[in-house]
Image (cartoon, rainbow, N blue to C red):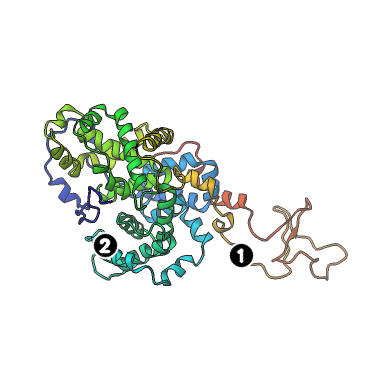
């Protein structure tokens, strides 16, 4: 099926310098809040360092935070993941790290396999189209394009029934900007199988179904925009295909892409729906805005050339946070639209796995391996050394001062304790969590840091 919006087309250069942005002229803005929030301010270095410290604490104790403090993880993702830790955080949030551990050596095996020629040719032709102005991908045959080829080829071998879809290329490219090829591959797998299942299948039924869900939600969010699109008979797939399948990586300014992805990895597909609803609302949501797009062609042109102000990071993120569209709304609409689909088109030909709404749902389904997330002991004691409880001096056994330690008291074996229990010379998880907690992470209320 050919896509209405050609996702093979050359992407525009969405990364602009501040100087270029400030010299751009804009028409009068009917929304004062939009004008106020248009230019984002840089995060002060001190604040960024504090955020990094908090994120390091979370990542070093991820299982505890995900189990008990998921809401705080969500709040910190909304504030923006520190750039230095973004790649690592995406791996943890998506479950890509667990997938890699569960499939050790699998990517290397796929990487060495020859691959299906019919997919290799298509992938090869698409490599230079992905972020051609980014230093990683600017050179044909450069390391960025090579890694992109490896990741996309590996996926066609990992899921031969799906093969390759052009919209996967920008997704993989964004991942490669933040992590090595193997980690990027498993994050791509999680996006395709957990976050956006069925999006990249041959018939594109899942994306069409989500288009109907989006249109129904638009009726509640912006009746004016809904009425206009209905009147013009513009099918959702005509404007939302690239948005959803590429997770806005080829639509939004770069800073907005990263912030949207931070929240997307944490909260799931509802973030993609919210962004789309916001763009439609602020593009077609008033009679004033509709004056210049009376026909179908003018409307589509407006949706292809969105106002930069509504895509600006600070404004867009605030709107995303405030828009009350939840997982429950999406799932309820999914059931309604699925029923209509079956009545008009019959059963779905591609059976997609269930969709997971964000990091918490994925973590509950595939709990993180505690062993992998706990550091190894950094102090190795010599053989024969005994440990005594905290606050007590070590005492030699009575009547046996010159003899070696009792059986079971070696540094690499279990140590008898006063209560009769035994432990290894490795800090307990509770002590690890306690010793790594920063002062800021113990605060009852999180600040905007």
Q: Quadrant of the C terminus?
A: top left
Place of residue 270 in the rendered image (x, y in percent of width and height, measured from the top left)? 38, 39
Q: Quadrant of residue 208?
A: top left
Q: How many marks?
A: 2
Residue 254 showing in the rendered view: yes
Q: Is residue 284 left or right of residue 263?
A: left
Q: Specify few, some or many for label 2: CA neighbours under 10 Å numbering under 14, 14-19, or 20 or more.
A: some
Q: Specify few, some or many for label 1: CA neighbours under 10 Å numbering under 14, 14-19, or 20 or more.
A: few
Looking at the image, is 393 positioned above or below residue 340? below
Q: Residue pushed farthest right?
A: 399
Place of residue 280 in the rendered image (x, y in percent of width and height, measured from the top left)? 25, 36
Tell me, for residue 428, which label it has, or none: none
| Mark 1 and mark 2 residues within 8 Å of each other at the beta carbon | no
Place of residue 107 in the rendered image (x, y in percent of width and height, measured from the top left)? 45, 66
Disc 2 designates what residue? 126
Q: Earlier in the sequence, mark 1 or mark 2?
A: 2
Looking at the image, is 128 positioned above or below residue 332? below
- How far apart marks 1 and 2 lie (CA) works out to 50 Å
Place of residue 272 in the rendered image (x, y in percent of width and height, measured from the top left)? 34, 42
Tell me, for residue 379, which label it has, or none: 1
């Amino acid at each position: 099926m050919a896509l209405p919006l050609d996702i093979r087309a050359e992407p525009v250069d969405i990364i602009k310098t501040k100087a270029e942005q400030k010299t751009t002229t804009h028409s009068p803005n009917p929304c004062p809040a939009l004008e106020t929030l248009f230019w984002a301010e840089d995060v002060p270095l001190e604040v960024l360092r504090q955020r990094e410290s908090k994120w390091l604490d979370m990542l070093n104790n991820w299982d505890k935070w995900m189990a008990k403090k998921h809401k705080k993880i969500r709040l910190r993702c909304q504030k923006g993941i520190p750039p230095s830790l973004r790649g690592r955080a995406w791996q943890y949030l998506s479950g890509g790290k667990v997938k890699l551990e569960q499939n050790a050596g699998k990517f290397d095996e796929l990487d060495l396999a020859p691959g299906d020629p019919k997919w290799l040719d298509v992938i090869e032709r698409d490599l230079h189209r992905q972020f051609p102005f980014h230093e990683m991908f600017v050179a044909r045959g450069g390391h960025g394009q090579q890694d992109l080829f490896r990741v996309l080829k590996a996926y066609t071998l990992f899921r031969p029934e799906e093969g390759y879809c052009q919209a996967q290329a920008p997704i993989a490219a964004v991942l490669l900007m933040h992590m090595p090829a193997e980690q990027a591959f498993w994050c791509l797998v999680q996006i395709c199988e957990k976050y956006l299942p069925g999006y990249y299948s041959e018939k594109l039924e899942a994306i069409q179904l989500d288009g109907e869900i989006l249109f129904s939600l638009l009726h509640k969010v912006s009746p004016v925009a809904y009425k206009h699109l209905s009147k013009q008979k513009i099918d959702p797939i005509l404007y939302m295909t690239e948005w959803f399948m590429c997770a806005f990586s080829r639509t939004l300014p770069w800073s907005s892409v990263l912030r949207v992805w931070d929240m997307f990895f944490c909260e799931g597909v509802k973030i993609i729906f919210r962004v789309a609803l916001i763009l439609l609302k602020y593009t077609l949501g008033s009679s004033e805005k509709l004056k210049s797009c009376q026909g179908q062609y003018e409307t589509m042109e407006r949706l292809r050339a969105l106002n930069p102000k509504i895509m600006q990071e600070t404004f867009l993120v605030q709107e995303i946070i405030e828009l009350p569209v939840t997982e429950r709304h999406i799932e309820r609409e999914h059931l309604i639209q699925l029923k209509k689909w079956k009545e008009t088109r019959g059963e779905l030909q591609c059976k997609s796995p269930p969709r997971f709404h964000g990091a918490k749902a994925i973590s509950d389904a595939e709990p993180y391996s505690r062993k992998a997330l706990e550091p190894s002991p950094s102090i190795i004691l010599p053989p024969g050394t005994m440990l005594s409880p905290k606050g007590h001096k070590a005492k030699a056994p009575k009547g046996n001062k010159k003899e070696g330690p009792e059986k079971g008291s070696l540094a690499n074996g279990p140590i008898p304790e006063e209560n009769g229990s035994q432990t290894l010379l490795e800090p307990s998880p509770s002590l690890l969590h306690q010793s790594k907690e920063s002062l800021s992470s113990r605060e009852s209320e999180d600040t905007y840091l």
